Amino acid sequence: MRAQPADTPPVSDGGDATDVVTKVGLALVRDGRLLLVRRHGDRALILPGGKPLAGETDVEALARELWEELCCRLVPSSLRYLGEFIDELVDDPRRQVLIRLYAGKVAGTLSPASEIREAVWHPVADLSETTLAPSLRHQILPSLARTPTARPS
């Protein structure tokens, strides 16, 4: 599946609601570079964040995921909602991911933990990296590159 605007209903191949995986992501940009992570056993670079647990708000999910994955604290007062992005799921192109993206800041030293193998600072304008998740390559990086005011320093 190709990228599509978030207001377009997801295309289903006859499956159930699991065809779309909802995640929250953090766009943490410093000096024109976006923080991306790579999980153990995966090639793809993805945003920090993850799936909200039942009853969890986006902010609660981001705070939990950042602590679990990168041992840092979310600064909730710094968050700005950037929108929803729908694209193919990185490890299953037959399914889609809906990412609710926030710009924001963290406190503390970033240290990969849990399922995260590494954290990298990727240039916002660089789409050449072959291991970028589809949502990053097709929508999120181009959007951040076009909207410098949406990027925290």
Image (cartoon, rainbow, N blue to C red):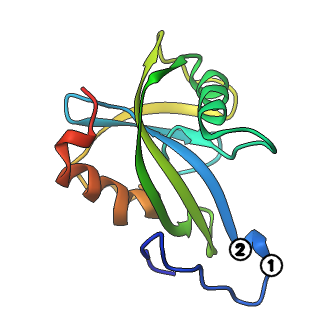
- Position of residue 57 relative to residue 91, above or below, is above
Give the structural element (helix, strand or loop) at label 2.
helix
Q: Is residue 45 left or right of residue 71?
A: left
In the rendered image, which residue does mark 2 sit on? 19
Q: Is residue 38 left or right of residue 103?
A: right
> Is residue 147 among what the camera can see?
yes
Relative image position of residue 147 (x, y in whole percent): 20, 49
- Amino acid type at circle 2 is Asp
> How far from the left and from the top, in percent, is residue 91?
62, 63
Badge 1, how many Cα within 10 Å: few under 14, some, many 20+?
few
Where, by quadrant of the figure, is residue 69 drawn? top right
Q: Is residue 117 above or below residue 51?
A: above
- Coordinates of residue 100 in the picture (x, y in percent): 52, 51
Q: Which mark is residue 16?
A: 1
The residue sitting at 24% across, 26% down in the picture is 153
Which amino acid, mark 1?
A: Asp
